[in-house]
Amino acid sequence: MAKGVRDFGPEEKIERDRIVQILKRVFESFGYNPIETPVLERYELFASKYGIGMESDAMRETFKLKDQGGRDLVLRTEFTVPFSRFVAMNPQLRKPFKRYQMGTVFRDGPIKLGRYREFWQCDVDVVGVGNPAIDAEILQLAQEAFSQLGLEVEIRINNRKILNGILQYAGVSAEAELSAIIAIDKLDKIGPEGVKTELQKRGVADKSIDTIVELITIQGSNNDIITKLRAKLGDNEGLREVERTVRYVVDDENILVLPSLARGLAYYTGNVFEVYLKNRATLSSSVGAGGRYDEMIAGFLKSNQPYPAVGISFGLETIFDAIKLLKQDGQSPKSVVQVYVSPFSQEYIPKAMEIAAALRRATVRVDVDYLSRKLKKNLEHASVYQIPWVVILGDNEIEQEKVMLRNMRTGEQALLAMDEVIKTINK
């Protein structure tokens, strides 16, 4: 097997599908519609200054290939850039346009728990709304999603304009800002001293470095942090946007303003978000991230028309790993089967198949024991795979043209006609 990819058996796949269904339900409850874009994209789309940018770690981790015509292609590393291309190529879309997309993305990066080379992302994005109220909706959507998934999270927020303000205050040139932001984004992984070393390597003066680290490590409540930064940066637009976004969130208890949060991608222009488990010891990787990218679509279109856009991505792999590590057992069955039909002998298999067909027409998921094993074996099979019902088909049942329906949860069973079986299961 290739490095950084995984197989998933039925039990794991059922759990992953459960997570996807919860996310889909939440996305649609907020009014987001699905779209689908290709796995393959042109290299220059991602490498452009309006994409993820040549200097970003994500660009260095891109899987690159050529087609038979010699054109440079990439496997998509995320959905935001393809989504922006989609919007640019479909000018007839009515704004605001709210979409979600789920599927595989690829990065040739370091491998650890929660980070793989093939993984699923589940994204929501909005184009056409510049008001921070929509940023707040994105955060509320994240809160709702993780609440339904049973995970306690902390949502971190910052703004690129705050970071630009800090760098300008520290005397860093405009040309060096993006490179410095990529270094700042590593604070959580390498600590303040590591960031200082990174900034030195990037040619930032020691005096500027001290100022930067002082400001990005400010502590306190959200209001305290904003107040302290405002005292240094003045009437910074990014501070106003973060302040309004947090104020719009109905319950901001798990929202944390973090001045060091950068999101090391070139395309972010305003608010940026990252979501972590409250218990970081369980899983250190983020379980969601995103932000505002108001210039990307206009850049692709070479247009002066504004295309405000904001979104967030949920990492299926990290969410799946987190749920496994927290041992949230029993949330998903071990099989999709709802009813297991147990014929006593081979001669009853045609009747068993007829019963299964009737149940399937009633939208029940059914499997049949084609080996005609002893009832004890089939009850054990249903128990192991958490199948809630067993239909028993023996001599007595055939004679009376009924079946014995056993509830595997309670152990109760009853002799019923097929219409009664369907009513009981659906009930």
Image (cartoon, helix red, strand yellow):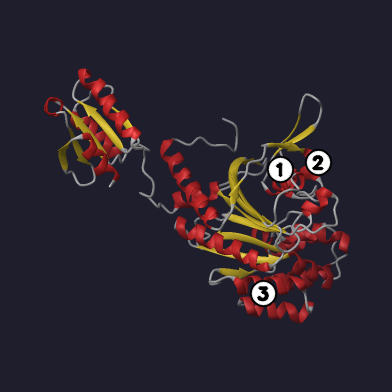
Answer left or right for 119 relative to 55.
left
Three-letter code for the amino acid on which mark 1 is drawn: Glu
399 w.r.t. 45: above or below: above
Numbered disc total: 3
- Secondary element under disc 2, as helix, strand or loop, is helix
Where residue 289 sits, quadrant-wise, is bottom right
- Sequence order check, earlier mark of 1 and 3: 1
The front one of 202 and 27 is 27
- Secondary element under disc 3, as helix, strand or loop, is helix
The residue lying at 82 percent from left, 57 percent from top is: 305
The residue lying at 36 percent from left, 43 percent from top is: 333
Query: Is residue 169 visible in the rendered structure shown here?
Result: yes
The residue lying at 12 percent from left, 25 percent from top is: 399
Identify the mark at residue 394; answer none if there is no mark.
none
Answer left or right for 27 relative to 12.
right
Where residue 395 sits, quadrant-wise, is top left
Identify the mark at residue 44; answer none if there is no mark.
2
* Residue 408 pos. (x, y %): 23, 42
Three-letter code for the amino acid on which mark 2 is drawn: Glu
Q: Are marks 2 and 3 in contact (CB under 8 Å)?
A: no
Distance between the alpha carbons at the discs numbered 2 and 1: 15 Å
* Residue 104 pos. (x, y %): 60, 40
Distance between the alpha carbons at the discs numbered 1 and 3: 34 Å
- Sequence order check, earlier mark of 2 and 1: 2
Q: Which residue is mark 3?
A: 243
Q: Residues within 10 Å of mark 1 (few under 14, many from 20)?
A: some
Three-letter code for the amino acid on which mark 3 is drawn: Glu
Identify the mark at residue 61; answer none if there is no mark.
1
